Amino acid sequence: MHPTIDQKALTRQLATAERRNKIKAFLLVLPLLLFVLASFIVPIGSLVWQGGYSDTFANALPETSKLLAAWDAKSPVSEELVKSFVTELKASKLKDPATPTRVATVVNRELSGSVSKFKQVMNASDLASPYKEKLTALNGEWEKPDLWRAMKIVSPSFTPRFYLQAVDLRLTAEGDVKPEGDENAIHLLLFGRTLMVAALVTFFCALLGFPIAYLLAHAETKTSNMLLIIVLLPFWTSLLVRTTAWIALLQQNGVVNDFLVAIGLIDNDHRLVMMYNMFATLVAMTHVLLPFMILPMFSVMKTIKPNLVRAALSLGATPWTAFWKVYFPQTIPGLGAGCLLVFILAVGYYITPALVGGQSGQLISNIIAFHMQKTLNWSLASAIATLLLIGVLLLYWLYNRLVGIDKMKLA
Amino acid sequence: MGGNTVGVHAFRNVPSMKLGSAEMKNWNGKLMLLGAMGTLAMSVAAAEAAQLTVISWGGAYTKSQTEAYQKPWMAKTGNTIVSADYNGGLAEVKAQVESKNVTWDVVDVETSEAISGCNDGLFEKIDASKLPKGDNGASPMDDFVPGAITDCAISTIAYANVFGYDSTKFSGDKPTKVADFFDLKKFPGKRGLKKEAKVNLEMALMADGVPAADVYKVLATKEGVDRAFKKLETIKGSIVWWEAGAQPPQLLASGEVTMTTAYNGRLFTPAVTENKPFVIVWDGQQQVFDTWAIPKGSKNKDLALDFIAFSTSTKPLADQARYIPYGPARKSSAPLVGKFQDDKTDMAPNMPTNPANMTNAIVQDVKFWADHYDELNERFVSWIGK
C-alpha cells in the first residue's frame, strides 16, 4: 500500500488542473483588467501625482533650485544665487525658447507681475558680473526678497503647495503654512456647498423616487413597462438639452411663469424668480439624477414578496406599521444604492449648476474646470480633484460601515 | 419580468456614460473626431492637395471667416479646409502639444491667450515681416494697427466688448453711459456679465469714473482692484453670468436681463437681421484683437502660414466686414469696408473702430493681463463663489 505516493500524484495533477483553470480564468478577465488599468488606475494615479509634482522650475534652473533651497528666505540673496539664476535662465532658452516664460508663468502664480520682470531679464543683453548690481539696476524689485521668495516656493519639484491651496492654505518661503487671505479663500466653502447640494439632491430624489419605484414595482406588467419607459426616456436625451429645457420652463418669461400669469395666480410685474438660483440647481439636478434613484429601488422592490405585508396585515398590523416595519426595511438595499449613486454623481456635477445656478451655481467642479481650461494650472486642478475623490471614497467607506456594501443592490 | 430586464439593461449602460460628465465626453469626442480628421488629412495629403484644420468660435463669426478667408483660399490654392468650433481657452491646444499629437493647424485665439500660449510654448513663432504688403503698398509692420502683431499670432479683426439693452424695457431715459449699467434704480432689471475677470474689472472702474486712459494704471494697484470689486458688488445680486458668446442675445431676447455685456457683433446681427430691439452702448467699449495662431508641432505649418498670410491681407480682411461688424486689423482694409450682406446697412457706423464709437474706449492691455491674469481671476472666482 502506497497511499501517500498516489495522493502526491493526485495532488499534483489536481494542482496542474487548477492552475490551468486559473490561467484560463485570468485570461478571461485580462481585457477587463487592462481596461481598468488604462482607464482608471493610470489616470487617477497621474492625477494624484500631478497634484504634488511640478518640475517646470527645477528642470529649467536646477542649480538655482539648489541654491534657493539652501537660502533662508530672509537674508539678502547671494551673488552666487543671482549669477546662477541669470545664466541658467538665459541658457534654458537654448533648449526650448519658451522655457523662460514658462518658468515666469509658474512664478507669476505666487507673485503677480513676475512675467514682465522675467521678460526684462531675458531682453537685457548686458547682464554680467556683478550680477546682483546689474539686475537691481534693471529693476529695483530684484533687490527685494519677494521675487526670490516666490521662486523659493515654486522651486522644489515635489511640493505640498497645490494640496494646501486646495484647502485654502498657502505655503510660505520659510516652509510654514498660513491660511489663504479672505479674498481668495474659496475652496473649502465650495467643497461645503457641493456636499450640501449633493445631499439635498439625494434627499429629493429619494423622496420623489420612492413612490415612483413602488408604483413601478407593483403595477401590472403592462402599465409598469410603460411607466418604466417614461422613467428611462430622459436617458436618451442629452444632458444639455434637459438642462436647457429647464431654462425654457423656469425663466422669467418661461412656460411656468407665463402659465401662472395667465391663470391670474401672479401679477405680470411680479413674475417668480426661479432661474439662476439654488432653486433651479436643485430642480434640474433632481430631475436629471432621478432615474439613478428609481432603478435600483425598483429592482429591489420587485423582489419583495407581497405575502409578507399581507401576513403582517392579517396579524393585526395597521397599514402604516406593515409598511414601516415589514416593507420598508426590505427596500433599504435599493434605497442605499440609489442614494450612493445619486450622491456621487451629484458631487461631480458642474454643467447643470453652471448653466442654471447663477451665483450659487459655482461648485467645486467648476473650479476644477476653471483651472483646467482657463488658468492652465493643472497641478492645482489635480489637487482639488484628488481631494474630491478622497471625499467620495470616505463617504463610500462610511456607507459600507453603516449599510454594508454587500447588501447594496444596483439592479 | 420584462420590465425588470429593460431596467437592468439600461441601468448598466448608463453610469459609464454619465460618470465622465457630458461635457467631458463631448470634449473627448471632439478631440477624437479631430484626431481622426487629422490622420485622415495626413493620409490624404500624400496623395493629393493638402487639408488644413482651422478652429474658430462658431456661429456668425466662423461664417464670416469662411466666406472671406476660407473659400477664396481654397479656390486659389486647391487645398481644403476642415472647420471646427471651440469655446476659447488654451486647454485643448495644451493637451495636443503636450501629447505631441497636434491635429489643429490654425486656431483663432484672443491676443491675451495668444501671448500666454506663446509664453507657454504652445504656439509657433510667426515672422510678421514676411506677410504680404497692404494693397496701398504699406509694409505689413506699418499696415497693421498697433498691437495687432505679436510673436506667435497675427490679428484679423478687432471686436469690442460692449453692453447693450432691450429698448422696449426702458420707457423714459435710455442708457448711454457705462455708469448706467450699474444704475439699478434708474434702469431696473438683471444684468448679464461674462464669467471672467477680464473686461468686467475695467468696466467697473470706468463706470466708477476712472478715465479710460488710467484704467490699467489704477487696476495695477491693490486699491484699484478693491475699487473695481466694490463697484461690481453693487450689482452682484442682479447678475446673470454668461460664458459663450451666443448667450447674451438669448438672455436679452428672453427678457431674463434688461442689459448685458456682449461682443458687439453678437448684438448687431439679431438687431439687423431679425429686427430685435437691441441697442449697443459704445461708451466704455473695450477692444480686443482676434488672432490666428499655429499650435506648436502642426504637421501643416507651411500651409498654415500661407493661409494666415492670405487671410490677413488687405482684401479678405475688408471682405469679412461684409458679414460681421468687426474692424479689420489692417489700416489699408478700412477704406474698402462697405455694406452688410443685406446691401442696405452701412458697416462703418457699426464698427468698434468708428471714431464716433471711440469717444470713451480702451484697448485691452494684454501685457497687464499676462502679469495679473492668475491673481485677478483667482480673486474674481472666489468673489463670485461667495
Image: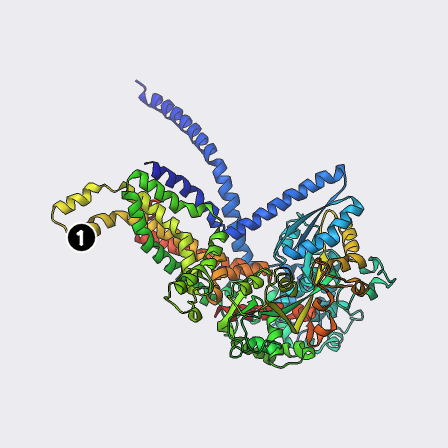
Query: What is the residue that sits farthest to the right in this orientation?
Result: B137
Can residue A232 be seen here? yes
Residue B339, position as x, y percentages in the image: 74, 61
Give the left or right position of residue A145, taking residue B356 as reference. left
* Residue drawn at 58 percent across, 70 percent down: B165
As rendered, which of B330 and B298 lies closer to the eye?
B330
As rendered, which of B89 and B82 lies closer to the eye?
B82
Query: What is the residue that sits farthest to the top in this orientation?
Result: A1
Quarter where residue A126 is shown: bottom right
Disc tally is 1
Residue B149, position as x, y percentages in the image: 76, 63
Give the left or right position of residue A49, taking residue B84 as reference. left
Q: Please determine whether, in this image, residue A104 is positioned above or below residue B93.
A: below
Please state which amino acid type lies under the numbered disc 1. Thr
State the SS at label 1.
helix
Residue A181, position as x, y percentages in the image: 51, 74
Q: Residues within 10 Å of mark 1 (few under 14, many from 20)?
A: some
* Residue drawn at 57 percent across, 58 percent down: A372
As rendered, which of A382 and B125 lies closer to the eye?
B125
As rendered, which of A386 and B192 lies closer to the eye?
B192
Color encoding of the figure: rainbow
Quarter where residue A117 is shown: bottom right
Residue A225, position as x, y percentages in the image: 34, 40
The residue wearing badge 1 is A321
Can residue A179 be seen here? no
Give the left or right position of residue A16, taking residue B78 as reference. left
The subunit carrying tag 1 is: A
Quadrant of the frame with the N terminus of chain B: top left
